[in-house]
Amino acid sequence: MGKAAARGTSGAIVVLTGAGISRESGIATFRDADGIWNKVRLEDVATPEGFARDPGLVLDFYNQRRRELQSADIRPNAAHLALAELEQRWPGEFLLVTQNIDDLHERAGSRRLVHMHGELRKITCLACHAVFTWTSDLDRSTPCPGCARPGRLRPHIVWFGERPLHLDEIGRALERCQLFISIGTSGNVYPAAGFVEVARRRAHARTVELNLEPSQGASLFDEAVYGPATEVVPAFCRTLLAGAGGGP
Ligand code: APR
């Protein structure tokens, strides 16, 4: 369906978010000047090799981020809330794909949501492969809540070199969408950074980037609005909903 036709319907929307949408909630991004990868080597804490080399270092890294996420002063911001409202009020299909491992989209009310890089408040067992919600620290001796084997638990997080989650569902949604919105991501990491091209080529979708500054893939988008997510995302969602029925 071409863009013109899309505008005449309340077409399907796919939204991709990255760390930038949670920045104003107090959660650091990865590649900004004060980003996480400027403080710790991703090779040490976000790869299977790093985990095999020093599991204690990796578990401590995610224990600290889990504790921070669960502290009282970390809460969804206006951008998270605007996306939850858009999902609830949009007459067409809607899927929110996040690269983030925080739970701020859920806490804002989002439901049609997939975490393609996993979730900080979940763990998985290397022995029985079960996934569990986990809110406390995880150490090397913790027994699996399912199979009881000790020392086989890891964060339910997709590390570099591992296959992201929900790619089939995401691919189907991208091939059907009339509007693809990318929010708060630098466009550095694939396959997420390639979703805009799938939406353009396979769905002829309208593509929009909402970010603090142009991302690596900025030239691939039809439109862009730059500014803090808590300002540009609610404004864009309001405009969409005002035209609902008029399509994205
Ligand atoms: N509002 C909107 N965008 C913002 C804000 C803000 N307040 N603050 C920062 N940004 C933007 C930055 O300009 C940058 O383009 O958010 C983006 C954050 O980029 P990254 O730090 O690279 O985070 P992200 O794109 O989510 O990283 C993708 O890389 O390390 C892996 O698994 C990790 O999911 C992560 C993936």
Image (cartoon, helix red, strand yellow):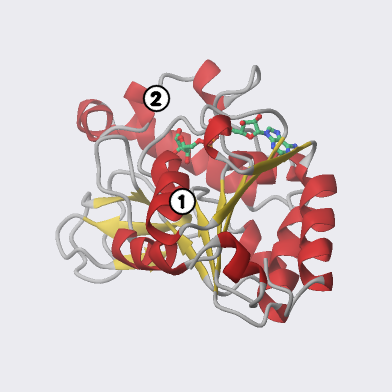
Mark 2, mark 1: which one is toward the viewer? 1
Quadrant of ligand 1 in image: top right
Q: Secondary structure at mark 2?
A: helix
**Pointers 2 and 1 in contact (CB under 8 A)?**
no
Q: In the rendered view, does 115 fall on the left or right side of 208?
A: left
Q: Residues within 10 Å of mark 2 (few under 14, many from 20)?
A: some
- Amino acid carrying label 2: it is Leu
Residue 3 in the image, given as x and y percentages of width and height = 58, 61
**Residue at 18%, 60% in the rendered image:** 149
Residue 39 seen = no
* Placement of the C terminus among the 4 image quadrants: bottom right
Q: Between 202 and 113, which is closer to the camera in this rendering?
A: 202
Residue 174 seen = yes
Q: Is residue 217 above or below residue 195?
A: above
Residue 73 in the image, given as x and y percentages of width and height = 78, 49
Residue 192 in the image, given as x and y percentages of width and height = 42, 44
Q: Of the numbered discs in the image, which one, if any, rests on residue 191?
A: none
As measured in the structure, the alpha-carbon distance from the residue carrying label 2 to the one carrying label 1 is 31 Å
Q: Secondary structure at mark 1?
A: helix
Residue 84 in the image, given as x and y percentages of width and height = 70, 69
Task: Look at mark 1 in the image and give the residue it sits on.
Answer: 200
Whether disc 2's CB lies below 8 Å from ligand 1 is answered: yes
Q: Quadrant of residue 50?
A: top left
Q: How many marks?
A: 2
**Residue at 64%, 77% in the rendered image:** 9
- Amino acid carrying label 1: it is Arg
Q: Quadrant of residue 212?
A: top right
Q: Of the numbered discs in the image, which one, if any, rests on residue 42?
A: 2
Q: Earlier in the sequence, mark 2 or mark 1?
A: 2
**Residue at 71%, 58% in the rendered image:** 80
Q: Is residue 201 above or below residue 161?
A: below
